Image (cartoon, grey):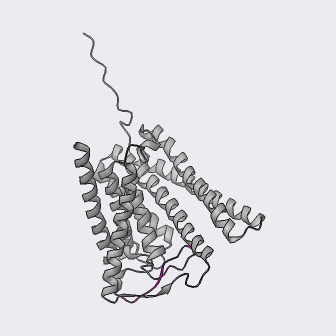
Amino acid sequence: MAQKEQTKNPTEGLQLWKVVGVFTLVFTAVQLAVAALDVGKDYLMELINASDNLRVFVGSTISRAGMIAAIILITAPVIRAVLNKPGVESLYPRAKNTWKDLLVGIGISSAAMLIVFLIELTFGWISVTGLALDGAASDAWLRAIWMALLFNLTVSVGEEVLFRGLLMQGTIEAWDEWGALFISSVIFGGYRIIDIGLNNANWLRFIPFLALPGVMFGWAYLRSGNLWLATGLHFAWNVWQGDILNLTGAHRGKNLFGLVINVTGPEWFVGTSYGIEVGAAGVLCLVLAAAGIWWWTKKSNLQGND
């Protein structure tokens, strides 16, 4: 009797170095596409001598939407080809109620940041000296708010698609879930150091701290099975820390529409100008967020089993 032919696993033999290599190529392609769209937007706006409102509400909106589309359109075919996964559906499935994960993620990070802010305010480690746009015209407020939303949406989607959707998902296939969580978080921490341009800092000290948010986002991905929850967490984490509460007191960019903060607390708790992630405040925020992730995903799983 003929032996029954065994079904071959399409990802069998997938090795970690191949996953990291593919990630590096896709990451580079995404950065080039994002840079081209950003430079192209600036050139076009200069060419037509656009007003500030036109630059933000039209130019930036179109370029940022293009960036998000490019990130997904570059990454999704690679996920299908290399990991044999359904591309966009493995990242942001359109199943019923998945949008709740996004909103809950936003709520969890927002609550965690507000708790840390109130703790630091209570102990006198920070003081509010005013509003970033105090006395500014209404359109200046709208521009800052809109740019903060656009910028952080692009960052959160881009980093989640690349680091969790591609790198972590691929490493799970090549290794296992906990190994994937570790590898993706360490690489994410290293990328954050390069991205924010740490100078004269102990990299061995900062990489573990900057990797911790990657652990949180990765755990959210493992618990929920998609990127909706992690993207909501990531988006609100950045918006509240930088553009609303300005917890480091160092942010003075065009996106800042919230508080002007004076930080006097101990560095071991409040962190540094690089972020609260490198202090106990960031660790506390991560613990609070992790508790929220556990509560929500447990609740969702119980409801799904009813």
Q: Quadrant of the N terminus?
A: top left
Is residue 14 in view?
Answer: yes
Residue 137's quadrant in the figure?
A: bottom right
Please state the horizontal and vertical placement of residue 108, each as a whole percent of the image. 34, 64
Residue 220's quadrant in the figure?
A: bottom left
The region drawn magenta spans 249-265
Please state the horizontal and vertical placement of residue 273, each as a whole percent of the image. 45, 80
Left or right relative to 83: residue 32: right
**Magenta-colored stretch includes residue 261:** yes
The residue lying at 43 percent from left, 42 percent from top is 89
* Residue 302 vertical placement versus 182 (above, below): above
**Magenta-colored stretch includes residue 151:** no
Is residue 205 in view?
Answer: no
Please state the horizontal and vertical placement of residue 110, each as a whole percent of the image. 37, 69
Left or right relative to 47: residue 220: left
The residue lying at 38 percent from left, 73 percent from top is 206
Left or right relative to 152: residue 56: right
* Residue 277 vertical placement versus 175 (above, below): below
